[in-house]
Image (cartoon, grey):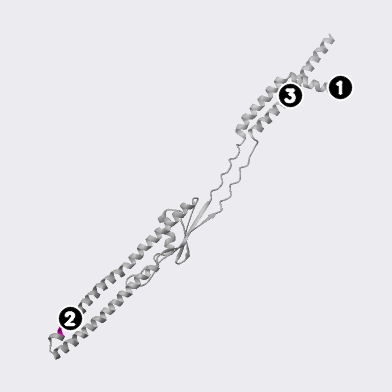
């Protein structure tokens, strides 16, 4: 036991004696480890930002009808569905999605991170389509309105002519004798009857064309319901980057421990060499 204690005290004596060497060696290794860590240790990965919420706005638009070439009285669609699918995104210069729900209905959609802005942009797209279709519908009805105006003018002339014929009949009754008056009355009555028939037919044609144009009020392009907004699930965050190597502090501490260990080993080695040298000198003195 006393021998172990003596050996331990001897070790501590050597460490204390070579403390400068041990401290300097540890500091040098720590500094070297710090320099190496700057080039080899990867900095901690940044915390990934949470993905933004994405809003999906959608609206259904029913394509209206217009009047065919006068006087066919047909009601073709204002625009072709496939044409709208191709044209709407180009005209609005937006990431607008358009697809066909039915031959008469298209689905218009838009996505973005701002709920209010997405809704407003989609409503603007739909309103431009409605305004464009309204103009096309009005243009298709214009030839029919022109025809109605022309028929009304002709009808007015007929009415004026019939009024003149009625006044002429009144003059015949009062100025001519019975035989002549009877013949003139028959002729005037037949002519008036024909004119009144023509006037009735003119009124029927006007009514028919007006009904044809009025039917367009129920055939306009309209948005079915309103703009529906849903929140799409955000994409999953990217996986964290793998951390190769240890932190700078750990590398420096490890370098210090390695340097201290090597310095202690060197201290004992130097002390052992010194003891061997002293012993060799002592033996040489004894031999003399």
Q: Residue 2 carries which label?
A: 1
Q: Quadrant of residue 207?
A: bottom left
Q: Nearer the viewer, residue 37 or 135?
A: 135
Residue at the image point whose x is 71% and y is 22% from the top: 22
Q: Label 3: which residue?
A: 264
Image quarter of the N terminus: top right
The quadrant in which residue 253 appears is top right
Percent coordinates x, y for residue 88 in the rendering:
42, 58
Q: Quick check: can you spot residue 269?
A: no
- Comparing labels 3 and 2, the label whose residue is closer to the camera: 2
Residue 144's place in the image compared with 286, above or below, is below
Compared across the picture, whether 255 is left or right of 219 comes to: right
| Mark 3 / mark 2, whichever is N-terminal | 2
Q: Which residue is drawn at 49% across and 52% down?
A: 115
Which one is nearer the viewer's eye here, 24 or 160? 160
Q: Where is residue 201 in the image (x, y as percent from the top left)?
A: 28, 79
Q: Distance between the residues labelled 1 and 3?
A: 24 Å
Q: Which mark is residue 167?
A: 2
Rate crowding at label 2 as few (under 14), some (14 to 19) or many (20 or more) other CA atoms within 10 Å. Answer: few
The location of residue 120, given as percent across then percent down, is 44, 54
Q: Is mark 1 on a helix, strand or loop?
A: helix
């Amino acid at each position: 036991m006393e021998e172990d204690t003596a050996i331990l005290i001897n070790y501590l004596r050597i460490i204390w004696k070579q403390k400068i060497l041990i401290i300097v060696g540890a500091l040098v290794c720590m500094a070297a480890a710090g320099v190496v860590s700057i080039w080899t240790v990867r900095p901690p990965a940044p915390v990934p930002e949470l993905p933004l919420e994405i809003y999906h706005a959608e609206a259904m638009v029913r394509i209206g009808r217009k009047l065919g070439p006068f006087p066919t009285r047909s009601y073709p669609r204002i625009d072709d569905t496939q044409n709208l699918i191709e044209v709407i995104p180009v005209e609005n210069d937006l990431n607008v999605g358009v697809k066909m729900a039915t031959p008469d209905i298209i689905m218009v959609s838009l996505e973005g991170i701002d709920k209010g802005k997405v809704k407003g942009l989609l409503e603007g797209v739909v309103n431009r389509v409605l305004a464009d279709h309204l103009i096309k519908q009005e243009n298709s009805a214009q030839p029919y309105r022109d025809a109605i105006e022309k028929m009304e003018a002709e009808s007015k002339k007929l009415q004026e002519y019939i009024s003149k014929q009625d006044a002429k009949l009144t003059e015949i009754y009062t100025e001519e004798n019975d035989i002549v008056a009877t013949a003139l009355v028959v002729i005037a009555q037949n002519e008036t009857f024909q004119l009144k028939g023509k006037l009735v037919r003119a009124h029927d044609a006007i009514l028919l064309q007006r009904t044809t144009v009025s039917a367009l009020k129920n055939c306009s392009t309209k948005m079915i319901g309103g703009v529906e907004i849903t929140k799409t699930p955000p994409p999953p965050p990217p996986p964290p980057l793998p951390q190769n190597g240890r932190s700078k502090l750990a590398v420096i501490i490890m370098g210090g421990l390695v340097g201290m260990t090597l310095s202690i080993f060197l201290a004992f080695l130097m002390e052992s060499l010194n003891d061997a040298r002293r012993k060799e000198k002592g033996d040489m003195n004894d031999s003399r």
